[in-house]
Image (cartoon, coloured by chain):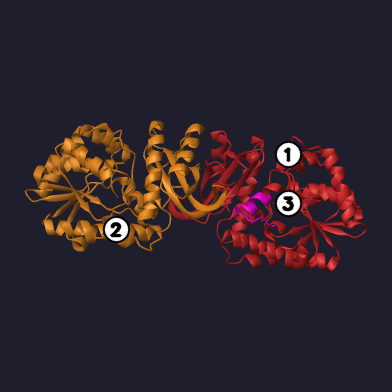
Chain colours: A orange, B red
Amino acid sequence: MIREITLQELDSAKFVSEKVQEISSAVGDRTAINALSGGVDSSVVTMLGHQALGKNLRTLFIQNGLMREGEAEQVVAMFRKLDVNVEIIDARKEFFNALKGVTDPEEKREAITQTFYREVFGKIVRESGAKFLLQGTILTDVDETVAGIKRQHNVFEQLGIDPQKTFGYRILEPLIQLRKDAVRSVGKALGLPPVLFDRIPFPGPALSARVIGEVTPERIETVRKATVITERLLKETGAFQYLAILHEDRVTGIRNGKRDFGQQIEIRCWDSTDARTASPTNIPFETLRQLAEEITRDVAGVVSVTYNIATKPPSTIEAI
Amino acid sequence: MIREITLQELDSAKFVSEKVQEISSAVGDRTAINALSGGVDSSVVTMLGHQALGKNLRTLFIQNGLMREGEAEQVVAMFRKLDVNVEIIDARKEFFNALKGVTDPEEKREAITQTFYREVFGKIVRESGAKFLLQGTILTDVDETVAGIKRQHNVFEQLGIDPQKTFGYRILEPLIQLRKDAVRSVGKALGLPPVLFDRIPFPGPALSARVIGEVTPERIETVRKATVITERLLKETGAFQYLAILHEDRVTGIRNGKRDFGQQIEIRCWDSTDARTASPTNIPFETLRQLAEEITRDVAGVVSVTYNIATKPPSTIEAI
């Protein structure tokens, strides 16, 4: 059982200095490595690792082909301003190969985990000689994995997997006692720019968690385009999280007066403080109309758009 | 090319007396038969036929297992008050057998058409000796069939099918020049009670048009329960049409703290005058919340509910 540090009891500055100290002690003068996705959790971990280890931390951005539009370039540019060097690793082929024909959500996550840890990141870690891996696991990931709701890609010990035996390195998870609100507070204390630590949550399996059914480069491109529109139009809501999901179900549409058996995008926009419970945001109807209009106009093949109106529970924030 | 009679140019009383005269002349002292679904179109046709033919019209309600909750009983009771006798024919087994394993929307419609005309209704018509079939085809059905958007179950001539050769009877379609708004006006002129001619449109293939993927008794029961809630809560909107659709895609949910890979219901509610174009109704957010709460609470297996926000075109009113 992991002891939670709530936002109320968190002393962010003290937390930062303790974690910097812990990472520094654990790694010593050896090297650590971490993967930065650009999300809040991995960004905070990168800064903690950077403060603890300086040049002895190697930070990679794995381009798995599942990220949002321009994401790799933006993340690298932002961290460059913070004097943190981030290497981009192009692994699109490896991930799409592993995802070919996979439709079950758990098998997708497993394919991504295996590709990430064994084939792509694991290989780099082994070749680099780094013995420590910094990860941004937070308490909600652990809860959901233990409860069997979702298998988060970075929760090993809770599942009885020894990463040292299985993957050959030790995992450090400095954020494991925190939930999302506390992580943001630590981000502020670390001096991260608001644009970074205020980012809406984005799942580990990236856009593959936003595609129901098989993940192909074409289907990822469809949901990526819908995501650009969704994020642009819903940014001003200030909501906890907003996302676009590509359904596998086909629905009837009309294009140029002819039947077009097309695709559907579902929009979700959540009010929440810690992701444990969430309610759909009461978005102005004009914004919903605008979302549907732009998505059906600009995203090829999409003839229908819906807005989620269920709460978590019994729904979850992501669809798969 | 069928000449449209618009609501503006329609003289309902004159239309009724002309159609009653036409039906009467065509049928003479022979008998006609018609199937009443309880929708506006077939209700209006039943009354026209009743006025034209009296006891020489035999009206059947085919219980195909795809109707809404209590629909057969309500329709029969309402027409009894109008002195029209309606026979209920239980054909649930025949329809579900024909729909087994069928997932393509066009094949579903075809299975229903074939079962209805050849196996169930066709058999009764042949045995009854009736030579005329009264049908509630309206102009929008013809447009959509010709355009290839949807294959309506009652449009034969437009598709080059001769019902006399194929099915052994002649089809009379007294409403074929009208769109929905004009049909309602004729309903008023016929003295139908508002509850009948003001009914929201309901598709020929009934709830099978509200199930994406295979139609089984269990899946129909799911969408039927969601439909009861949807119709009760959206009645007050006064919208043109509102409906619940059961998706085939599975989405993640949580029940009692455990993962529940469940089902999703999509709600559509349309503002429209003639079904040719339509916009989603701006429903109060509290009503949407209520819909989602009741559906996820009372409809077994459903963990997620969405609301359609796309217009027609490029969407269509029904999903399949």
The CA distance from mark 3 to mark 1 is 16 Å
In this orientation, which residue lies closer to the viewer: B163 or A73? B163
Identity of the amino acid at label 3? Thr
Identity of the amino acid at label 2? Phe
The chain ID associated with circle 2 is: A
Marks 1 and 2 belong to one chain: no
Whole-percent x, y for residue B219 in the image:
59, 58
- Disc 3 marks which residue? B137
Is label 2 or label 3 in front?
Answer: 3
- Horizontally, residue B131 falls left or right of residue B228, namely right
In this orientation, which residue lies closer to the viewer: A149 or B120? B120
Mark 1 touches mark 2? (CB < 8 Å): no
- Position above or below: A137 against B156: above
- Horizontally, residue A149 falls left or right of residue A187, namely right
Whole-percent x, y for residue B135 in the image:
77, 54
Q: Can I make out residue A50 in this image?
A: yes
Residue found at the very far right of the displayed protein? B29
Q: Helix, strand or loop at disc 3?
A: loop
Residue drawn at x 91%, y 56% is B28
Residue drawn at x 74%, y 40% is B182
Q: Is residue B151 magenta?
A: yes
